[in-house]
Image (cartoon, coloured by chain):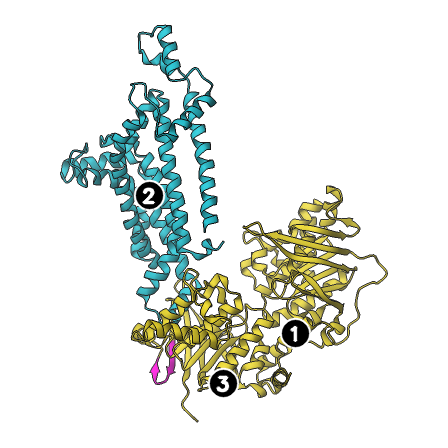
Amino acid sequence: MIRFLGRRAFELVVVFVGVTFIIYVMVFTLPGDPIAALGGDRPLPEAVQEQLRAQYHLDEPVWLQYLRYVGGLFVGDLGTGFDGRAVGDRMAARWPVTITLALTAWAIEVVVGVVLGLVTGLRSGGFVDRTVLVGTILATSIPVFVLGVTAQLVFGLQLGWFPIAGTSAGWPSAYLLPAIVIALFGLASVTRLMRGSVVDTMRSDFVRTLTAKGMPRRNIVGVHVMRNSVAPVLTFLAIDLGYLLGGTVVIEAIFNLPGIGQLLFDAIKTHEGPTVVGVATALILIFLATSVLVDLVNSLLDPRIRHE
Amino acid sequence: MTTPVLSARDLAVAFSVGGEEIAAVHRVDFDLHAGEVLAIVGESGSGKSVTSLAVLGLLPRNATVTGSIVADGTELVGASERTFASIRGDRIAMIFQDPSNALDPVFTIGYQIQEMLRRHDPKQSREDRRARAIELLAMVELPEPEERLDSFPHQLSGGQAQRVMIAMALACDPEVLIADEPTTALDVTVQREILDVLRRMRERTSAAILLITHDMGVVADIADRVVVMRRGRVEETADVRSLFSAPRAEYTRALLAAVPRIGAEARVSTADGAERPVLEIEDLVVEYRNRRRRHIRAVEGVSLAIRAGEMVALVGESGSGKSTIGKSVLGLAPVEEGRIVVDGVELGNASREAIRTVKKRIGVVFQNPTAALDPRRTIGQSIGEPVRVHDGVKGRALAARVTELLEAVELPASWSGRYPHELSGGQRQRVAIARAVALDPLLLIADEPTSALDVSVQATVLDLLRRLQERFRFACLFISHDLAVVDALCDRVVVLHRGSIVEEGERRRVLTDPEHEYTRRLLAAAPVPDPDEQARRRAEALAG
C-alpha cells in the first residue's frame, strides 16, 4: 500500500512539472506582445515597455521564468497579473462560484447516473432501458449552449422556476439550472457506463453462486453487484470532475456566473500568462488529486488492485 | 425403497430465442436418494447442466420449465421466488465448474461464508458464525482455516477456491449438493483431492450428490448411479458397475469406446532416426516479469529434440511451463537463455530472412478453435491466408489449394464459403489444423488441441492428426495435460514439473513404468473409466 502511494506520488510530481512547463511555454510563445498590447491604440513609450518587461521578467529566457514561477508556487505566490493584482487573490474570488457549480453538477451525475445505470442494467432490453438509451443519445447530441439557452427560456423565463442569470439568488436555485445543463453530458456517459458494468457483473459466475446460496436479490444487487460495478464509473467521474471545474466557460457565460472559466477566458484573451498558468495549474492539481483519490477508493473497493 | 430427496419427472426445458422455442431437455426422469452420488453424464449440448440449473431455478428468464421436480415434498417447477429462497443454499446447495470466478472477488471468503450463515440463520451470534466458518474450512481440509477467513478469492489456487465453494455449500447442512463439473477446470492431482473431499463429505454427512460431468473417469471414481444424457434426452440410467461393464444404450457404448485409456497398443512410429532433428531446444530458460518486476522462471533449463515424423508430447499440469516452451519456439515468450534451432536455423541468432523462411514452416494449433479463427472471415479465407501471404498464390490456384486442404482434414470442399460460427467445435478445430498444415510444415506445435472438445469428437481429431502426420511427416510438439490422449498419439513423452523436465522417454515406458515420483502421481491421479479399477486404486492409496 505504501509502495503504491509512493509510486502514485512520484507520478504526480512528474505530471505536474511536465504539464505546468508545457502550459507556461505555450502561453509565453503565443503570437503577439502582451506588453505592447497593454497600451491599446496608443503605443507605450519604448522605455516604459522595457521597464514593464523587466518588472514581469519577460526579458529573461523562458526556462528561467518558469523556475522563478515554480519557486514562487512553493511560497504560495501565484504571480501577479498585468493589473497589479495577485493572481491568487483573483482566483480566490472566483473559485467558490465554479466549485459550487461543478460539485452540484457532479452530484447530479453521481446520483442520477448511478441509479439510472443500475435500473437499466438490471432490466436491460426493457422499456425503461430503451427510453433511457434514447434520452442519453439525445442529451449527448445537443450542444451545451443550445441546451443552456433553451433551459433559460423555458424554466427561467416562461415557467419562472429559476433565476436566469447571476449568483445573487444563492445556492441552490441560482446554480441548479446551469448545473443540470452541464451535468447532462456526463450524466449520459455515467448512465451507460454503469449500465454496461452492471450487465457484465450480473452475468458473472459469482452472481449465480450468490443466487444458489439463497441470498436475496436486494442483497446481491445492493452489496455485491454495486461494489463490483462502480470501478469504471468512478474513474470516469474523477476525470469528469476535472472537466466540470475547467470546462464551465460556456455555461458561466450564458448564465453570467463570475466563475473561474470566465477568468481563464479573459486571461487568455489578454495574454495574461501568470493568470492562465495559475488557473491551469490549479485545475491540474485538482485533476491529479482526484485521480489519486479514485485510485485509493478503487483499491479499497477491490482487493486485487491492492495486492497487485 | 425410501422416498428420494430429489426427483424429476417428465422434466423439459425450452428456451425462447428470437420468438422461437428451442427445446434443450425433453422428458427427463431421475431419482436421487439420501447418501447417494448420482452422476448425469453427457457431452456438450446434452442438457445435463440445464437440468441441474432447473432444479434451483437458476435458468435465464427466457427458459420455460415444465414437468415436475420434487425436493422433499416441495414442487420446484413453477415455484415462487420465496420458495426457492428457502431452498437454495439451505436444503439444496450447488457448486460450479470454475471456482476462481464463482466467488465474489471483492469480499473475503470469510465474509462470503458468513453472509450465507447469516441469511439462513439470522439468530446465530457473530462469534458462532465465525467459529462455524472455520469449522467448515477445516472440514474441506483447507490449511490454516482461521487465517484463510481473511483471504480474498484471488489469493487462493483453483483447488483451494473449490474447497471454499464446497465448504460454503455445506454451511447449512443441505440434503442435496449439486456439483456442476466441479473438477473440470482443475489439474488432475487437484481434481483427485477435490473428489476425495467430496467422497469424505458424503461419508460424514447424509447429503446426496447430483454430479454433472462429462468425464467418465470421474463417474467411475465417485458415482453410485449414472444417468447418460444426449441431446436433451436420457439414453440410459444404470448403476455405475453395470454401466461400465454392460452398457445398454448404443450411445453409452460409443461414448465409452471414445474415452482414451492408457495402454494403447504398439504402433509403428513414423519417426526416422537417422535425420538431424527438426527442432532442437537446448538449456532453454524463460522468465516472465510480473508487475512488481519480480522474475518468475516459467522454464528452467529444458532441452529436447524432435525428428521429422516424430510426435513428442510435453505433459504437465498448469504452471509446468509446457505451453511456454511451445510459445518460445514461436517467438512469443521472453527467452532468457538457451538455444532454439529449427531445421538448422537458430532462432535467436540467424538473419531476419532466414528466421522468416523457417517460421513459415512452423504450423500451430491452439486449444480453443473459436478464438483462433477470425469470425468475420470464411473458413476458406482463413485456411488460404498463409498460402496467400507467404507464397503469393492467388485466384484459382489458391481456391484449389484450399479445396485440397479441406479434403485433407475431411471437411467438404464446398464449405469454404462458410463462417466459423456455422461449424461445430470439432469442425472448427479441423479448420485450424488445415490452416496449420497449409504451408507443408516441418514442425507442428499443437497446444492442447482437443481439450475443448467432447470425447467422441476428440477421438476423430486425434485420428486426423495421426493421418496427417503420416502424410506430411512433420515433427510434432504435442502439448497436453491428458496422459491417455498422449498415449494414443505420441511416440515420446516429456514430463514437466515446475519448469523442468522430470522424466522423458519412449511413450510406453514412461506411461506404464514411470521412473519419477511425479509421473507416478500424475498417472495415479487421472481417474480411469472403470469403477472396479478405481476402487482398487483407492484401496491401494489408503493402504500405501
**Residue tagged 1:** B521
Is residue A294 part of the magenta span, yes or no? no
Question: Tell me, what hue is chain B?
Answer: yellow
Of the chain colours in the picture, the one used for chain A is cyan
Q: Tell me if residue B247 comes above or below residue B47 in the rendering.
A: below
Give x and y (percent) for residue A60.
45, 17
Judged from this view, the residue extending furthest toward the front is: A75
Q: Chain of mark 1?
A: B
Secondary structure, mark 1, is helix
The residue stretch that appears in magenta: B66-75
Q: Amino acid at mark 3?
A: Glu
In this image, B507 relative to B381: left or right? right
Q: Nearer the viewer, residue B519 or A159?
A: B519
B354 or B281: which is nearer to us? Answer: B281
Q: Chain of mark 2?
A: A
Amino acid type, callout 2: Gly
Closer to viewer: mark 2 or mark 3: 3
Residue annotated with mark 2? A186
Residue holding disc 3 = B203
Image-quadrant location for residue B15: bottom left
Where on the picture, by quarter, is residue B146? bottom left
